[in-house]
Image (cartoon, rainbow, N blue to C red):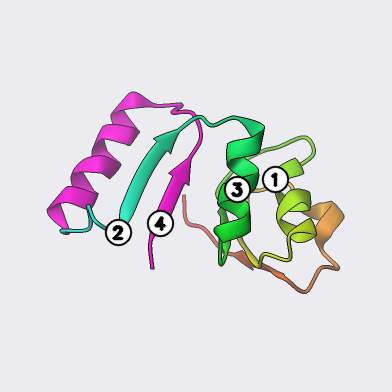
Amino acid sequence: MKLDMIGSVESKKTYNEVVKLVQDLGLTDKVVFYGEKTNQEVVQCMKRARVLLYTSKFDGYPYLIAEAMACGIPIVANEQGDLELFKCCPSIIQCETSV
């Protein structure tokens, strides 16, 4: 199994820490950092996905959740995400996070 990380980097410091952790744990062959992708590229990635890990702290309307649901992908999300609209969906697992 492989973790594909897709999206822009909000904090270069955090990104560098995550890259270093992946290297330190010897997971460079299991974790791939793609950065931003076009809509078509994201669709192709989602078609291959087994699960979506949603880590957004706030998203006015979490389109990514709706897109993953449309693809039939199970979703793991933090409790900070704005998932009120999707509480009835059995394919979403919402996890507690510590601050």
Q: Amino acid at mark 2?
A: Lys
Magenta region:
1-25
Kindly report which numbered mark, 1 or 3, lies closer to the viewer in this rendering. 3
Lower position in the chain sequence, tag 2 or tag 1 = 2
Residue 46 appearing in the image: yes
Is residue 2 or residue 25 the one in the foreground? 2
Lower position in the chain sequence, tag 3 or tag 4 = 4
**In the rendered image, which quarter is residue 70 located in?**
bottom right
The answer for how far apart the CA atoms under marks 3 and 4 are is 15 Å
Residue 97: x percent and y percent? 51, 58
Q: Residue under circle 2? A: 30
The answer for how far apart the CA atoms under marks 1 and 3 are is 14 Å
Kindly report which numbered mark, 2 or 3, lies closer to the viewer in this rendering. 3
Q: Amino acid at mark 3?
A: Gln
Q: Residue under circle 4? A: 3
The answer for how far apart the CA atoms under marks 1 and 4 are is 17 Å
Element under disc 3: helix
Circles 2 and 4 in contact, beta carbons < 8 Å? yes
Q: Is residue 24 magenta?
A: yes
**In the rendered image, which quarter is residue 84 located in?**
bottom right
Lower position in the chain sequence, tag 1 or tag 3 = 3
**In the rendered image, which quarter is residue 95 located in?**
bottom right
10 Å crowding of disc 1: few (<14), some (14-19), many (20+): some
Q: Residue under circle 1? A: 64
Identity of the residue drawn at 56% across and 60% down: 49
Q: Residue under circle 3? A: 44
Element under disc 1: helix
Element under disc 4: strand
Identity of the residue drawn at 40% across and 57% down: 3
Identity of the residue drawn at 17% across and 59% down: 25
Q: Amino acid at mark 1?
A: Leu
